[in-house]
Amino acid sequence: MKRPIIVLISLLAFALTVQGAKMPKNATKALLRITTFTSDGKPLKEGYGFFITSEGEALSTFDLFKGAYKAELTDEKGKKWTATRICGANSLYNIVRFQTNCTKAVALPIATEKMEQGHTGWVICPNSKTPLDCGITSFSLIDSMRYYTLSNQACNQLAGCPLVNTQGMATALIQAGVGKDSTTAFALDIAFASLLHTSGMSAAETALNSIYIPKALPNDLAQARTYIFLATQNLQDSIIYETALADFMQTYPEESAGYIQAMTYWASKGRFEKAEEYYTQSLDAVKEKADIHYEMSKLIYRLNMLKNYSVYKDWNLERALQEASDAYTCHALPLFLMQKADCEFALRKYADAFTTYQAVNASDVSSPKTFAAAAISAEMAGMDSLTILSMLDSAIVRCGATPNATTSIYLLQRAAHLDKYGRYKEAARDYQQVEDIRGTSHLNDNFFYMKSLCDTRARLYARALNDIDKALSIRPNDYGYMVEKALAEWRMGNYDEAIYAAQKALKINPQGADAYKAWGLACGEQGKKEEALKHLAKAKELGDPQAQALMDSLQGK
């Protein structure tokens, strides 16, 4: 008989505990009636939420905030507040955490223990001092958290309200019912709120970006930097981005990243006076000023590369050069020298640019690109071919032992220079290597045309013919290519093919002097002197400068 008596006493004790439990005195003061609004100020949705910290953080359902540009909160006494920042959101589990402009809120304490099946709690209801009794009929696990099924279907109309345990602590967030006639109610474990926070990647989160209220900045500096950087690419609402920048600069006033982003942002909108304002502020606030000067130099440089840019104040290339020099004075980094060289090149100070690029090339950040830039600067400064080619040689060497797409870029540049300097066979070898690396199908008609001309100068006539055929396979109706094919066939001794190509060229351009000349040359090799003279005379009539000399040569035979 002792065991049943003990069980009975335990049950009575539990019942008395539940019956004797009291609601926290200020529970209803934590409850909020929420109205969200569209961009034009029209009401979007109405629902509930509640304060979870005395500093004014609150919880509600994601559905209520989705698409909202503003959220107005009303407490038990009718006092109104505003949601100022979204701290985190999850659309799958229908929960949002947000900061309000209430700095002394009456908040519900957060439960640390889970409710179990059979436990009873209360739902804090709006406009009622009597809570709604609600039991836990079951729960499912979401990692270490719980999704409760509730015994009282009336909870379906109370999404966003808190479920509190018998100690008066918030233990779950009531969820919306599934459909109007749903007989089952649910609640999400309050512990889920602890997972709602912004991070560097939050700027790309779909759930957060579907709420158009400004977002809270991540607490970690590195994450905050990432957030404001990614926000430029993912946030469509300028107010949200501007708020994030302001928050960053207020939280981290000595960090250059916020000022740099603000300078770039306002300049992109043509608000150069705002960009300059942040530049000036940054020089007063930031200790390490090198990055500020560097970014300002890049900003002004990019603007001056735009055709439609109208110079603002002294925001010209000279100013860009000065900012780059100031950056290097603050901190002697090769990166800043590279920017300085780019500015010198843009200012057509080619000899200076070459010297500066060479200083970069002597550092540990040298690359194929910096050597190629030095080569172009040397060429524009009128330096000798050996200097230019040595720069391109170094660019190619730094691409690595195994040729790749990057190697082909500099091989092509070297090929053009070797061709220009009369080193045709070397140039032809570089052109061929470019084709071997990239593949024939990945090159355009102009490449094969230039390669064919170089092959011709290198006396590689068969390859020249093959290359011009490749150019014509891409652009079959190009007059210049067809004339070059006629000449290539002539050089190979294929006179009938040369005449046929010349005739095709004339169908494209009936007034083509070059085509008549090629036709005349082929006829001359076939011993058709009169016909050759006729076509060469036509070429002369159409303005070909070589036609007369060719006619004289043919008549002298």
Image (spheres, grey):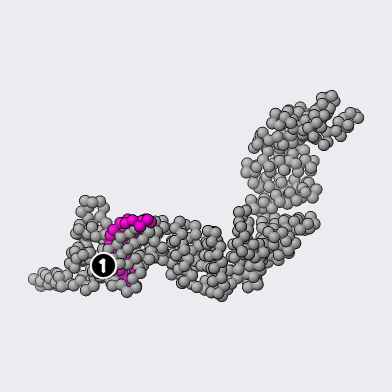
Judge whether residue 364 can be spotted in this image: no
> Which residue occupies the foreground of this view, 48 or 400?
48
* Residue under the image location 36 percent in, 61 percent down: 70
Residue at 50%, 62% in the rendered image: 229
Residue labelled with disc 1: 78
Residue 468 shown left or right of residue 219 in the figure: right
Image spot of residue 98 (x, y percent): 36, 65
Percent from the top left, x then y, of residue 552?
Answer: 88, 31
Q: Residue at x 29, y 62 (%)?
A: 34
In this view of the protein, which residue sits in the foreground, 78 or 384?
Answer: 78
Residue 317 falls left or right of residue 123: right
Residue 45 forms part of the magenta stretch: yes
Residues drawn in magenta: 38-65
Q: In which quarter of the view is residue 317 placed? A: bottom right
How far across and down, in percent of the image, does residue 237 sit?
44, 58
Toward the right, the furthest residue is: 556
List x then y, in percent, for residue 262.
Answer: 52, 65
- Tell me, yes or no, if residue 40 can be seen here: yes
Quadrant of the snapshot with the C terminus = top right
**Type of amino acid under label 1:** Gly
Figure quadrant of the N terminus: bottom left
Give above or below for 346 relative to 430: below
Q: Quick one: label 1, few (<14), some, or many (20+) residues within 10 Å?
A: few
Q: Secondary structure at mark 1?
A: loop
